[in-house]
Amino acid sequence: MSKPRLLSGMQPTGVLHLGNLEGALRNWVQLQEQYDSYFCIVDWHALTTLAERPEEIPHNVREVAIDYIAAGLDPEKCAIFVQSHVKEHAELHLLFSMITPLGWLERVPTYKEKRENLQIESVSYGLLGYPVLQAADILIYKAAVVPVGEDQLPHLELTREIARRFNYLYGEVFPEPEALLTPAARVPGIDGRKMSKSYNNAIYLSDDAQTVTQKVKQAYTDPLKIRKNDPGHPEGCVVFALHQIYSKDDATTIESECRAGQRGCVDCKMQLAGNLNSALDPLRHRRQELLAKAGQLERILKGGAEKARAVAGETMKEVRKVMHLE
């Protein structure tokens, strides 16, 4: 029996960081073994925030693709492709926009958050209609499941509503994709906030060992632990939070020594830097291997787009037929 299909993607708004690795990529690497997987780099979505700086997107696309592969996505097991290389996404987005009520889009929580956080006075349709394009991304592959975090559930529910509305109006074409809530570690930035490119607090997958060590040295720790023998409070410490991911076998000992005042922050940071660099070394090695092979990345993305277009093209034939657009 054929495997159920899966679709997911990331915006190329910059190079990827530990939060992307632990929040999505590690799960994707496992899921590619279980599903017929399509992993997209959604460059059109990136224009919602980079419309005035489109020259940044090609470089970002390349970096994200390299990080996908360095993290363990295998082009022999999944399709890795760029959204804009499959023009059918745009056609389906246009057709979905004709049947999607404006009120559905205005109630999406992330739309309100972005508008407030970015202090946008005049909202573009691209930002408001982001979930419609996202629905097209998913439904054009008739994905059975979509790996998401809880914050993305409203977007996926809107995708399901669009599928239901289309099927009601024109006939059963699209399955309603299910959310695949995959476990993900929360990765704080070095300042204690959520790790994010926009906060300038991220450790990137492309950082060399020296850069990683330097960033770990700057990481926020317990402000009440001034001397080594002061009792610590690891629950509020960025370094300990990262130890729980990258020093799992020693995390219990690290916690007890910190609370007992038997561990200094400098030593604790150096241990984390060593473990973190050991975890990133295989990714760095795969990055270098890929970059050493001229044209290899382009061939992978071209092959992924060809596989994606084959599926998307068949879906659009069905859509045009039921909508009498042949």
Image (spheres, helix red, strand yellow):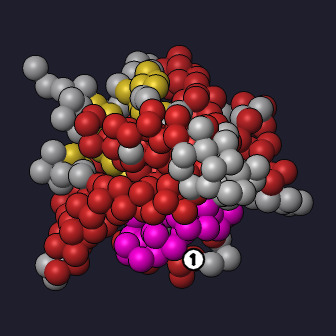
In the rendered image of this protein, does residue 244 appear above or below residue 305? above
Query: Which quarter of the figure has residue 227?
Result: bottom right
**Amino acid carrying mark 1 in the image:** Pro
Is residue 35 magenta-colored?
no
Q: Secondary structure at mark 1?
A: helix
Q: Is residue 205 visible?
A: yes
Counting from the top left corner in percent of width and height, residue 200 is at 64, 67
Query: Which quarter of the figure has residue 28?
Result: top left
Q: Report the magenta residues as a range.
A: 193-219
Q: Is residue 121 left or right of residue 232?
A: right
Q: Which residue is mark 1?
A: 54
Residue displayed at 68% across by 63% down? 199
Query: Which quarter of the figure has residue 183?
Result: top left
> Is disc 1 surrounded by few (<14), some (14 to 19) or many (20+) residues within 10 Å?
few
Q: Residue furthest right?
A: 121
Q: Is residue 135 left or right of residue 261?
A: left
